[in-house]
Image (spheres, coloured by chain):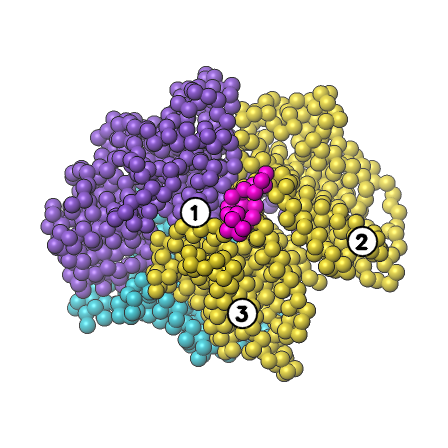
Chain colours: A yellow, B purple, C cyan
Amino acid sequence: MTLDDAKVLVDAPGGRHANPARHRPDLLAWAGAALVLVGALLPWAAFVLPGGAYPDRATLQFFDAPHLVSGFRLHLVLLGLAGLAGRARRPAGIGVVVIAVVHLAFLIGLGAPSAGGPVALVGGVLLVWRRPAVPALSLPLPGRVLAWPALLAAFAGLLWLVSATLTAGGQSRATNPHGGAEFLAFCGFAFALVGVLSAYGVLTWLAALTQRHRIFAFTVMLACALLLPVTGAGTGYWMTVASTIGVYAATAIGLNIVVGLAGLLDLGYVAFLGIGAFTAANLAHSVPFPVAALAGAAVAGFFGVVVGAPTLRVRGDYLAIVTLAFGEIFFRAAQNDIGGLTGGVNAIPGIPPITLFGQAFNQPVGALPGGFLYYGLAVLLVAAAMVVLVNLKHSRTGRAWEAIREDEDVARAMGVRTGRAKILAFLVGATMAGLAGAVFAHKLGTVGYESFDFSESVTLLAAVILGGMGTVPGAVVGASLLFVLPEKLREFSDYRLMLFGLALILIMRFRPRGLVSSS
Amino acid sequence: MRTKGTAVLTGLLALGTILGAGACAGNKTETASGGSGCDTSKGRLVIGVIAPMSGKLSAIGLGIRNSAQLAVEQANQKCAVKGYQLTVDAQDDEANPDKGAAAAQRFADDPNVVGIVGSYNSGVARAIQPKIAGSKLVQISPGNTDPALTRGADFATAPKRQYDNYFRVVGTDDLQGPFNARYMVEKEGKKRLAIVTDGKAVGENMATQFAAEAKRLGAEIVIREKVNENDSDFASVLTKVKAEQPEAIYVGSEYHVAGPLSKQAKDLGLNVPISGNDGLFDPQFIALGGKDGDIATSVGAPIEKLDSGKAFVEAYKKKGFSDGYGGFGAFAYDSANVLITSIGKVTAKADWTGAPAQRTELIKEVQGYRTDQGANGTVGFDQYGDSVNKLFTVYQVDSGAWKDMTSGEFEAK
Amino acid sequence: MATLAQQIVNGLVLGALIGLIALGYTMVYGIVQLINFAHGEVFMVGAFGAHFISLYVLPEGVPWYAALPVMFLAAVAVSVVVAMAMERLAYRPLRGAHTLAPLITALGVSILLQEVVRVFYPGATAPLPFPRAFPDGSLAVGPVTVLWTGVLALTVAPLLGAAVHLYVERSRLGRAMRATAQDADAARLMGIDTDRVTLATFVIGGVLAGVGAVLYGIHYTQIDTAIGFQNGIFAFTAAVLGGIGSIRGAMLGALCLGLVKSLAGQYAWGGAQYDYVWVFALLILVLMFRPQGFLGRPERVRA
């Protein structure tokens, strides 16, 4: 990502800055762009592959139907055109290289010679190599008349990008044998797209706009999220994955309060999700869902205070291990069916779906896919958690937390009641996780101890850190990445978790403060 | 600095993608070579496989996947489903209910998917069942042994079918555990029994059923302990067990726990036989420390004594899969063949559309399926979706190899 | 009484094996304040390295006293190479970054290493039997029996621990390590190459993990790709219990952890199924009343 390059001063006086100096035309770079365009139109696979025709056909499409360029060829054409412009050159080039390398590797694996691949690859390398030294643009902030449509368009674009990423490569490996390559190549294109936008300062500009029109932006975002089921990604499968993401994202937002705001590293956080889930599961047959959910939240919150109590004495990484210990104790206790509350190894089966106005949440509504209602519930849950987080972050309590995070002793010296604030962080975070746990229980229909082991705590923490600690959308971005990536990497069967590990390392290498970083 | 970083990034990314794409391509050629010389004009039908293919249970999961793959390739060669080419879509559930449910939902959404072979873990099946019940997608499990999945929580007293689209080809815990107990108490004459479990559902339930039957037959359960499934150090638990002077130890777990446990018991001077369920019945049990005299029960007749079983083993070996068929490969092979035969009958009547009505028809075909030529002998289902094959075999380690002692059906008394 | 003595021995053997991993944790933490969750995987790859040498390189029929040193060397070599690569490629670029970023990197490294071994090492999808490269049988003292491999672990682990302690206290590099641990910036100003010191710390951690891996393998006679993670958590717990950053503390913490697990399984409420719970409950209690662990220094106020 090139957001770093985009550190422009949006709020600088005047908002505008001098245009970058004119550059001499760079013939090599233009040649690179031209090669990309040519490569896009050349045949990529010389024959029809055993698993079916290669995406966008393997034949000489240029003669076939030059105006019908679609799929990754369309992406290449767009990136080639973008490569003509100075600023966009590097991100476009990287995108081209990724697309070319992915397809080439795939084709080489199948033993198919390719003409378009090498040409586009050379073009892409030229583009990356001949990047001009121009700063990102900084765009002026418009008034409301322009800002609202701009935000609408931006979030609609985001919705398209999310839906396109989810559906890239098709739904099933058996019916689309090229799905894995298509997905990775699309990731290259999406990366380039974001990079180009960032190079032109659009991302920073949008971030500033969102900040200024917070409530409007939030409403639009919520609407967009609720519209996902009507896009191409509106299948029961993606609804299932997305509602799981929602549950974990809400939990991760709670963890974000504890880790991101208050700076208290928690390695056993999934226990609160579990406590909420087990509470709701036990009450599922006796009380309506809202009551069970509140009970789950309350019980989890109570245990949050219990776990938070040692923070009065234990600090830093020592606190991390105390929370890890609590997490393990919860896991063992659940496995051994403590008090007959967790079902032990046989789990608690047969939790009924949530039912509202006679509509069971796991059934399809009209043309909308099954699981849509759970998805909607998850979105609302996340939205509520985000509202809580934003309000707390900018409140007196939030400032106290951030003071503790930066330096606890100084905070105490300045009159912050650190003990109370720290326990409050655990209370709020755990309550959120408990609420999410109640949804988790009903959504899955069964709750067992194995859903709450240490690696799940680590996943939650990874979501917070990957997304960006202490930021509002961070936990959601992180959780989405952590669940979507392994699902999409299913195409790579045995190598899937390996690639996932590699991705974690790379993301931290290049974005150590998380994907959404607060500067 | 930045350029260098980019170079590293690009390099690593390229490496990763080449690795991944190469792997992907490898799988492709495998599947593509299957259907030669048959009419496949009506397209592809997919058999979904859900199994743990990464992590600790991956040996079992990969055996399940490969065996289903084998069945499908054989079917394609024999043109078993006229007009269609069959493929396997194997999804890794990581033994996690949530992941398994997502994969099942994906199959349920896809009209080309005719049925699911899976899951291995009963916990995953509990999450899958409600997901696919609505779409009538048929599921045949090669590994779920929790009796509650078919007969409900009160399986012993008031059995009630849970889902009409759920079947399994393995015997359940409430048969195998008591069968083992009967052998240990009546044939081996062990009256003081210790139980060690690994805290996972199969082992726990099997051990509970074992204990009930053993007590009924007049034996005494002197101690019951639980170890952690990831532990390798059982010295502490075994010291505790040793103090109770048992005559045999029932291990409710799999070979990777039971093998080392057998050795560590002997090392501590507790030289008594280990007994366990089909999870122990693996050559690795002996390699990992299983000693002569140790006992395991397994579902079905000995595979080497059945022609159909031998044929499966030979065909599997011929394919040259990198992983063995494991303890549940033969069951996965049988499960896939149930689906293949049934879908052949359904598509003979009408082209496959994947509509719920047609899927329901497929369920009926599966319910009525019956053969004696499965890799594990008889394959068929009773009114609950359980396997009709209630035959178990006792194996004992003899001079460093498993030897079958006796086979029989279990009938509750 | 016999049972008690036996349980104490059981606990000490487990503790000694965990201790070797805990030393790696504690040293890395002491120098760079990084909880290296991937350290358990260094231990795991070492075990596979030894397995590889013994199974595929050494000719059959090599006597154990010839095979064992070779296996130790192989395990140490593999562990050290992986530890160094980890430091150079994954952690060093993050030096000075946000404190929690390396944690996620460690996690990525951990997943990556486990999966690489699982997918590419022949047969590693299931537990593998480890070569028996040490005399079978056990030492019997009255009613108590200790496997010879256990005796070996109980001898080697404390000796290595003491050696590392001496090295850090006496040698030039050791002094540089202590200086870096106290204040990296000041150490750099004093002309200490802190990058080199950090790398050396990872190397020492790798050596200990490699030795521990072989001891573990010959004692439990099986290895799998999950042993790193499981024992890594134990080792981390032991390191914290003893006072993270303290070498003697790590060994002490590990032995204590082994004893508690073993004795709690025997005598405490709930039996063996709750032994982990007692280990962690003890940990919480110790940290509540002595937040820096047994031998750790009270935490400095961070800048």
- In the image, residue C194 sits, relative to residue A37, either above or below, namely below
Q: Secondary structure at mark 2?
A: helix
The circle on residue A426 is 3
Say how many tags the image has: 3
The part of the chain drawn in magenta is A355-374
Question: Decide: marks 3, 2 in contact (CB < 8 A)?
Answer: no
Inspect the magenta stretch and tell me whether residue C99 lies in it: no
Q: Are marks 3 and 1 on the same chain?
A: no
Q: Residue B268's spot in the image, x, y percent?
A: 21, 60
Q: Secondary structure at mark 1?
A: helix
Q: In this orientation, which residue lies closer to the viewer: B85 or C206?
A: B85
The circle on residue B127 is 1
Question: Decide: marks 3, 1 in contact (CB < 8 A)?
Answer: no
Magenta residues: mostly which secondary structure?
A: loop
Q: Amino acid at mark 1?
A: Ala
Identify the residue at the far front of this view: A357
Q: Are marks 3 and 2 on the same chain?
A: yes
Q: Split into 4 quadrants, where in the image is the N terminus of chain B?
A: bottom right
Q: Amino acid at mark 2?
A: Ala
To which chain does the residue with label 2 belong?
Answer: A
Q: Which residue is mark 2?
A: A147
- On screen, residue C144 versus residue A75, left or right, reads left
Q: Residues within 10 Å of mark 2 (few under 14, many from 20)?
A: some
Please identify, in this view, whether the residue under mark 3 or under mark 1 is nearer the observer: 1
Q: Which residue shows up at 19% across the image and 38% down it?
A: B409
Q: CA distance from mark 3 to mark 2?
A: 38 Å
